[in-house]
Each structure stands twice: as C-alpha cells, then as structure tokens.
Amino acid sequence: ETESEKANLAVTLSTAMNEVLAHASFSDHPIEELVNQACWKNLLQNHVNGEKFTPMNTLFLRLFVAQPGFSIAVTLLRHYSVILFISEAALEKIFKPVMPVKEEAQYLAYVCHRHNHCPRFHIRRARFVNLSFTSLMKTDKSMTGLFKPSCILCPVLHKHKFDINCYGVPQDRDFCVISVPKLTPEFPLLQWFIRVAPRDTSTCSQELYLCHRWGLIRCEWRCRLISQQSQRESISEDLDLFLQARKDPDGTALQAFVAQVERRVVGLIIIRDEEDIELIRANFDVERFMYFSHEEHGRLCHFFLNPVSLHHTKYLFGEVLCLAHKSCLYYLLHPPHYSHKVGKSHFFSCKKRRPSCFLISSCQAPFALYHTNRKLTMEPKVTINARIVVVGASDTGLAFLEALTFCPHLRFNNLTLISAQGLLDRYSDDNTRFLATSHCYSDQDQAQLSLRSWISVVKGKMKAIKHKYDYLILCTGLQYQMPSLTTDAITQKTNSVNPHQPRHRHLQPVPFNLFILNDQHDCLHVHQWLMDKFVELTGDAVLYGNTIDVFTCVEMLMHLSVSSRRIHVVHPPEEDPFSCFHNDSVEHAVKQALEREEVHVHHDCLLTDINDGQHTDPVTSVSFTTDAQTLRMECAVFFIFSYKTVDYDTFKAINDAFLVFDGHLVIDSTFHTNDPSIYAAGPLTKSSRRYHADQWSDFCFNSKKVGQRAKLPGGYNYLHVLKRFIFIICILQGRDIVTGRIETDNYIHLHLSPHDVAESITCLSKNTLPVSNLPCLYRKHQLLLNHLCSRYDEGLVHDMYRFNHRELVLHDRFADFERWMMAPMLMAASVAEVFQKSEAYSALRKRVLDYLNYNRYHLTMYARPGMLSSMSI
C-alpha cells in the first residue's frame, strides 16, 4: 500500500487541467520506526517541551511531494496542529522546531500550529442577561456574524416536542440550546451540539440542538485497556469474557476500552478480531470506502457513550483504532434490531453486492453491515434536516429511500415512510406467495438494508396532503380494486360483453371472505383465514381476473392442500392483445397444467352480481355475464384480480391538493408535479401529454430492475424480464434463441433485437431459477455472451443455463467495468487495424487485466499473466 492509502487525510493540489502540483499525506501517529502507534503521546510528553499534543488536535505529516520550483501551498486544518519528525527544506518556512526536553534526543520534531494560520475567535467572559436572543442580536451587533437570526438560545427545554428526558435539566443552567429551521445548512458551531431527535408526532418546523457545559471543557481523552476485575459489576457478559480470557467462546481475541473525561468514565467500547473478512468482502461493497488489504480488521461488539460527549465520537473511534492496531471497524446489525440508531454520524452503511454465483455463501442469518476506518473518521458528512416524506412502501419508494440512506457523504435526519402496513420485517414465505414478485426486495435484501435504522415509519394511509413537510415523494403505485357493480354497469352488459366497463368506486362494505390482495400483509392475512376457515371445510374458491397473480394464487391454494376441483378461474374479456405471459409456450404449459389438475376455467365472463345483488356478508354466490348466458357459481371465498388503478383515497388527496391528474399523476422529466415541493415516481405517474410519450410512462418500467417472478400451476418457476413497450415494438423484429423444453425443465427463451441485444428473457422450469444472475443478460449484446448467435447456429448451445454459467457478464461489477472500458474506446479510431496499434488498445488491454486481477477471488476461471509460468506442468 502507498502512504496515501494508509493516511488518515490526503490532500492533493492540482490545476484546472488536473495536473498535480503538490500532495501531502497525514496520519494520526508517527512512523512505526520511531514508536508504537499506541504510545506516541508518552513519547512526546517525555521528549518535547511540555506541549499538549492529543489525538483530538494533532496530525503527523507522513509524505509531502511537490513540483520543482513550485511555491508551497498551505492547507489550513481547522482543528489540528501538524507535527513533522524529519525536516524537509521545502517546509522550513511553515514548520518550526520543537525544543526537546533532553539534549540527547535522537530525532528532531517540527510543528505547524493551526492557530498560526487560522486564528481563534476572541471570546470575552459572558454575562447573563434575561433577554430574548432576537433582542440580544439587535442590541449587540457584533454577534450578527456569529449566529444566524433564526437561532435561539434558551434555558427551557420544550419537552412536548422533543425527546430530551435522558439528559436531565439541572437548575444551574448547564445546557445551551439552539433551535434552527430545518432547511438551514449546518454551520460550524453546531458541531459542538447534539441534535435532539424529534418525536414521531412532532410537527415543529425547527431542529433542536443541545450542548452540555462538560462538552466544552478543554479535556483530554483517554482510551485504555480495562484490566481491573473490580469493574466487572457494571459491564456486560462480553466484558466478563474479556476480563477472564480476553477471548470469545470461539477463541476470537477481544479488546475492551473505556473513555475518560476529567477522570470520569463516559464511554465503553468492546471489539473483537474480524475473521470473516472474505465473506464480508464478497457480500458487501467494502472497497467503496477503502483499498482492501489484509491488515487488522475489527468488529464492534458494544459501544456505550454518555450523550453529553456524543460530538467526540469520531475522535474516540480514531483513538480506539490506533490503540487496537486496527485499520477499520465493522458493525453487524441483525434483524429485527432495526431500531438501533447505530453509527448514523460516524459509521457508513455498506451496500450489499448483488447475489451471484460468485458470492461466498454463509450459514449465518443475513445482516446489515456498517463500516468505518481511520480515513473516514476525518471525513465530514453534510447534514440535511429537511423533512422528506415518502408515501408508499412500493419498490419505487424503497429504492428511493435506499438511495438516500446509502449516500456516504450525506446524513438525512428526517426521513419518514408512510405506508398502510408500515415496513414489514418479513416479506415472503413459502406459504404466503399468493402474488407474483418483482424480486426487488427479498427478506435478505431487507435484512441487509436495515432501513429502520435510518427512517421513521408511520403506519397509515394518505387521506389528504397538507404542507407539514419540505419534500413529499408519492410512490403509492397501483392497487387491485373492487369493481363497481352499479345498475348502469349491469345494464350495459346485458346483451353483449363490453370490456370497457365503467370503473366506479365500490361504495358497499367488502365481505369478509372477499379478498383483494395487494401486498404481503394481505397475503399473511388471507393465509391465516384460509387455514382457519376454508382449507379443511367445504365450498369452492373463485378467482376473477386475467393477471399473472390469478395463476400464482391457484398454485398457492393447491400448495395449501385445497383440492383443485374446488378452484374456479374466471377470466374477464381481454383488454390487452397479449397475454400476461407474453410467451405462447409458457401460456400453453400453464393451460395444460390447469387441465391436468382439473381446475375449472371460464373465459370472457364479466362480474355483474355478488349474492344476487343482496350485498350481504359473506359472499355465497357470484354471477357473470357471458356471450351465451349468465354464469352463476356458489363459493366460500372470492378473489379479485381484475384490474389495477390508483386507489380512491390517493386520488382524492391528489385532486384536493390541485395536482394535475390525467388517469395517472402527471410529472415532468425530473419527476416534479405541478407543486415544486411534491415529487412522484413509479406506476402512479405518467408523462405530460406535451411530451407525446404516453407509451414511455413509468407504468412500463420497474423502479429497480426489469423483471417478474412467480410460482405457476404445475409447480413451474417462472421468470420474465423485459420492458413492456419494447416487447410490443420488437415482437416481430430480431431473432429468438430458445433452448431446452418445458417437459425437461430447462426452457429458456431469449429474444434479441435487430442489433443482437437481448430485449427479453423468459424462463420456465420446475427447478430453482438463478433469479439474481439471469437478469444480467438483459440488454447485453450477443458478442458479450461468448458469440451466442454463431454458437447457437452451429448447434453448440443446448442449455442456456449452463452456457452462461460463471460468465464475466454475471459479475456484479461488470456494469462499472463497461463504463470504465468506454474511456479509451472513445479516443480510439474506428478502423480495427489502427485501433490495435494505438495507445487506446494497450490501455484497454491493461484495464481488462487489472479488472480480472482485482476481482481474482471471484473470477478464478480466467488466466492472468504469469499464472501459467507459476504452475507446474
């Protein structure tokens, strides 16, 4: 590793043309040849003339380089003095020698004090004046530049708006409180204050910050190993293990530290050696924050700190890393402990890597990973207190929250999710898969995101839009609705079947055995009801609709041991010229499976009556109009999957807020509605008519990835990947690559565009499908798939599942690799011969080898230079 990679802070000065002029690297300890990094404070105190150097105010210059003849540029560090142990001629004007205590000192130390380049404010002794802060600013104009007019200093804490009971309020005014508007950018003074989290019911437009006078004491932090057995009474079981054996039960080394201020213990940290480094690296994007090496990695087990000292947290972690000889710390958060606000300020969330055949599997339950290292302890985050409210826990809403919470340089303090069912801890179960899924957020995804650690969840439904927010994001999507059974609708269908039935709101109460499934909570409820009141009893189940959810529900009913002869599938007239499968072979296989199971199927039937129009509870019969005669069936449970649209309460709230609604909520190209503070995305929305792009509305696209997964009758696993509108355009263009047969459980259909790009993927098999890998083929050129077309034409491709197994395109970083490779390609000539002789070709080849070498722990099937010579033949 280079000095810059090891440094806590690295500063590079460059020109507008990206020409490097100078570079400096700083560390939190001297070079290892001089002293152990955990003991450098004692070294300075014994050899330097009484200077107070601590980890909170000291950095060490490890590397400095500059262009010849370039004048020195000074970087002002607001909180640190810099010490140099080896004199450099170019730095003599900035660094001054420190007089040693002993003349026989074997080294010289040079120091550059911060206050020589960034002077401190002169602070006069304060006096108490019983005036409001606004009046004080008008009286003393010298304070205008120090505080914003909206700041308020007050001795009283408003307990009815903020949770501050843990601090206590002494009578001698030990606390200073500042209240600032939520949209005010964080200014330097607030770094010494602790933000008080508002209660969930608070509608206050101000942010409350609190500081105890102990937090301003000029104190010295000490983190030391605990060695006294007498402290065991107040420490947890892990600390007992440390005191007894300094090891976990599995033999992993433990280290325990306490933090002291004025000889008082204010914090405790217990860490252990991290031994699952390869597992973490393979499943989380740790390289986003550090150049991965096999230095010492630690895992944070416990962390306690007095709230008064929370603003010192980053210094505490930096000191622990130094004393423990660790390069980084991890914290593993397992569900359901999502309420822990762990490391929001000083730990960074690690994104999970996309599951693939390359990942190292683990027998332990999925978890969320938080990370910090020495460099990150000095990296500030921009605090955003704006009230951002997301309505709807749809794939779109969760993807938006994921994007915000995983911004490494931003800290969002007021993220709120409003959902009718809240945020479920468990999203799927083998016994509750009544609906097809997009495979965007599985149980493992939820565990690895731990969104509850970052957002407030409000269980409720949007009834009206009032301006109690700064930004509102509408992601409610579309839901199955109860069709209207009005007299007008019935009369309209008496003589002929009209697919364009008026879709009025159903005003009658929904019977308890009529189910409209829209989310996992509905599936959990219907599963319990079926097990209690249907499976072991008599009566039929009627499913009404044309969507794929009808077939997944049929399969789940049979999975719950419901006799297939008790199941009736009723299809309304088709409005879409294409079936829900978009594949004739799949549709034929499903029809055959229903026939084999003797499931009753009825076509071109339109729902007109429930209980012969009596509107009684429960549902005992349903009636449909057909081309021939009225179809009436008795039933014990009725499922409706007829159509999806915007929920009525959502529509009313949108309409009452004067937002433009044209069948869907109208947005522009940047997701704005006509209200500048309200955004929207997902199937709820559409483009304005002035774009003439109704076919490209958000309804045609998935928010995170393009795909649909389902369990179909006959035990088939189904996966379909496409863009809805692309399919309609390209169905008669391009070519098809089909391997396997449905009967042999290895059917896969790949449709290529006229440009040989994969536009749709359809898989059907009774075996488990690699749902994380197959969508990677989408939008890939056939040349990237090992010249798929030519090999298919030559009869060499018999099974696409095996043909693409362990291909480079399946790697989760292949998209980044493609963008990286485009840079030299853009500079190359179009002629192949010229390109191969150009520098761009060499750069391209080098990047391929660098990528394979960097990811060699996954891509072991590719040879690299020097590999063959090192192997014995």
Image: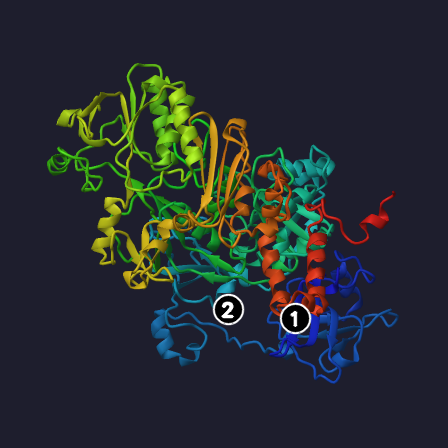
Residue 679, position as x, y percentages in the image: 34, 58
Q: Dividing the picture into quarters, in which one does residue 356 lie?
A: top right
Mark 1 neighbour density, 10 Å: few (under 14) some (14–19) many (20 or more): few
In front here: 287 or 788?
788
Q: Amino acid at mark 2?
A: Pro
Q: Is residue 133 above or below residue 73?
A: above
Image vertical order of residue 468 relative to residue 425, above or below:
below
Element type at mark 2: helix
Residue 79 spot, x, y in % from top left: 61, 69
Q: Nearer the viewer, residue 187 or 469?
A: 469
Could you give the CA–CA distance between mark 2 and mark 1, rounded to whole angstroms? 21 Å
Residues tagged 2 and 1 counted as in contact (Cβ below 8 A): no
The quadrant of the picture occupied by the C terminus is: top right
Q: Amino acid at mark 1?
A: Val
Vertical arrangement, residue 788 with respect to residue 102, above or below: above
> Dot 2: within a 10 Å radius of its alpha carbon, few (fewer than 14), some, or many (20 or more) residues?
few
Provide the residue designation for mark 2. Answer: 188
Residue drawn at the location 63% of the way across and 61% of the way down: 821
The answer to whether residue 500 is left or right of residue 17 is left
Q: Position of residue 11 (x, y in %)?
A: 65, 70
Instruction: Give how far across and how far down residue 651 sits, in percent.
Output: 24, 49
Secondary structure found at label 1: strand
Any part of residue 752 in sight:
yes
Q: In this rendered view, identify the residue nearer to me: 729 or 745.
A: 729
| Quadrant in the picture for residue 807 | top right
- The image's mark for residue 11 is 1
Q: Is residue 647 left or right of residue 108?
A: left
Of pointers 2 and 1, the one earlier in the residue sequence: 1
In terms of image quadrants, where is residue 655?
Answer: bottom left
| Direction front: furthest residue | 794
